[in-house]
Image: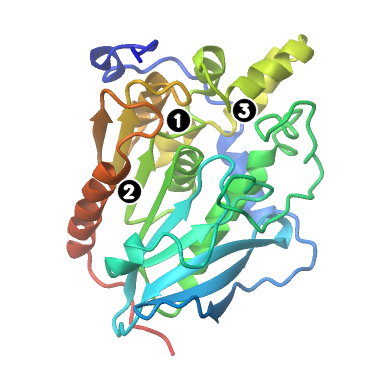
Amino acid sequence: MPSADLPLAECLTYRPELPLPDGFDDFWSATLVEAPHDGASDKPRFEEVDCGLSQVRTYDVSVPGYGGRPVSGWLRMPVGTTEPLGCVVEFLGYGRGRGLAHEQLMWACAGYAHLVMDTRGQGWSAAGGDTADTDPGASGTVPGFLTRGVESPETYYYRRVVTDAVRCVEAMREHPEIDPARIVVTGVSQGGGLALAVSGLVEGLAGVMPDVPFLCNIPRAARIAGLPPYTEIAAYLQLHRDRTASVFHTLSYFDAAHHATRATAPALFSVAMMDEICPPSTCFTAYNRYAGPKDVRVYEFNGHEGGTEHHRSEQLAWVRALFAGLPTGQAVRS
């Protein structure tokens, strides 16, 4: 399908005016420092499970996320390691949950720890989820998650999800078998947007790998994307004709293109030029604003599937080279 967005040459230099909302940094500092806590356990839990794999250890994970509410995940680690492990923390695409214990083995087979974070309230696709979203502002007037609590930044759904993502990275930094100096965050689509958000909120990451990232240049995406989920915003504004300015004001606090300007870690992006879900110009908005060292792989004739396993090969090589150049941050704690 021919691209309906900007051609590659224009995307490579595309830096639209994207005003930073007042108090952006203060909002996120307050969110992460003062996030409400309902008295739930404040320690991550790792329970080993037997899923029939002899070379990979798998742990059922629960991390206190936004408000202290538990966020599920899977942690997979290679068997027989004695040195601190590099770790890949992965955030999932829209609608996906953490799935089953024996899935997604690539990173563990490559010798790294791999945490997959469940996404609160999601997981209605084949990859089921186990994390509820019962917080205030969880309801919306159109199906989906993009307009849940969109009346204000404080009640917006992705405030909770981004906080969950930061807490998962923090949990990995404290894990006794993980080297805190070698943690990479990654994700496809929604997961890529979350990886970018974390890149701007967490200092000292080793690397960031956003694939066809969602939540970038949201005003443009809501106006040109041909397929969901950005169309949820248009559907909401069709019903609430007087809320356009206030909705985009709320969304500006969650635009990954703003978080990208705060990032310092090396990044490997991917962008697909025929993507009707995350239009390439929106992904390049974040890439061109990304403040750390960066590189990008462009899949000119692909849609939202992007580079799939071809890109996984690029990522494996990139992470290997990245970790090889970093000193070990700690010894394994008993």
Q: Amino acid at mark 2?
A: Ala
Q: CA distance from mark 3 to mark 2?
A: 24 Å
The local crowd at label 2, few if under 14, some if 14 to 19, many if 20 or more residues have their Cα within 10 Å, is many
Q: Nearer the viewer, residue 182 or 229?
A: 229
For the residues carrying marks 3 and 2, which lies nearer the camera in this image?
Answer: 3
Q: Quadrant of the N terminus?
A: top left
The residue indicated by pointer 1 is 257
Residue 4 occupies quadrant: top left
Q: Amino acid at mark 1?
A: Ala
Query: Percent position (x, y) of residue 280?
Result: 37, 22
Q: Earlier in the sequence, mark 1 or mark 2?
A: 1
Q: Amino acid at mark 3?
A: Leu
Query: Percent position (x, y) of residue 313?
Result: 23, 49
- Residue for point 23% across, 14% down: 9
**The disc label shown at residue 251, or none:** 3
User: Can the viewer see residue 30 in this picture?
Assistant: no
Q: Earlier in the sequence, mark 3 or mark 1?
A: 3
Q: Earlier in the sequence, mark 3 or mark 2?
A: 3
CB-based contact (under 8 Å), mark 1 and mark 2: no
The residue indicated by pointer 2 is 265
Q: Nearer the viewer, residue 97 or 166?
A: 97
Say whether residue 165 is left or right of residue 245: left
Residue 329 occupies quadrant: bottom left
Q: Secondary structure at mark 2?
A: loop
